[in-house]
Image (cartoon, helix red, strand yellow):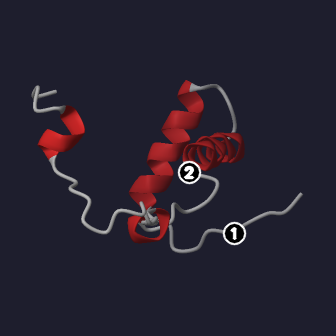
Amino acid sequence: MKSIHIRNLDDNTLVGLKRRAARHRRSLQKEVESLLNDAAQMSPAEEPEPLSQKLILKTVSTGRPKAVWDRESIYDDDGR
């Protein structure tokens, strides 16, 4: 299993983590491990693609060069 080393941790942060570990009745190492596991579960597996790359406009020929595409012709003007 891989490990990490955290440098320059603020004293207040360390004290808070130790208090939290004591409340949960576990070691400081297990508390930090739990926090990191929770954080990893909340992050998405992949970064979402920008919206501009998800939307692709495809057009087709209808065979009618002067076709009318307005609300009234599509919805029979009943306001849906």
What's under tag 2, amino acid-wise? Ser
How far is mark 2 from mark 1, CA to CA?
21 Å
* Residue 77: image location, x then y, percent: 10, 32
Quadrant hosting residue 63 = bottom left
The one nearer the camera, 44 or 1, is: 44
Q: Earlier in the sequence, mark 2 or mark 1?
A: 1
The one nearer the camera, 71 or 40, is: 71
Q: Secondary structure at mark 2?
A: loop
* Residue drawn 65% across the image and 40% down it: 34
* Residue 42: image location, x then y, percent: 55, 44
Q: Secondary structure at mark 1?
A: loop
**Image marks 2 and 1: residues in contact by CB distance under 8 Å:** no
Relative to 38, residue 57 above or below: below
Residue holding disc 1: 5
* Residue drawn 39% across the image and 55% down it: 12
The one nearer the camera, 75 or 22, is: 75
Give the number of the mark in front: 2 or 1.
2
* Residue 11: image location, x then y, percent: 44, 60
Q: Quadrant of the N terminus?
A: bottom right
Mark number for residue 43?
2
What's under tag 1, amino acid-wise? His
* Residue 24: image location, x then y, percent: 59, 26
* Residue drawn 73% across the image and 66% down it: 4
Report the side of 62 relative to 33 (left or right). Answer: left
Considering every residue shown, the one lying at the far bottom of the view is 8
Relative to 43, residue 24 above or below: above
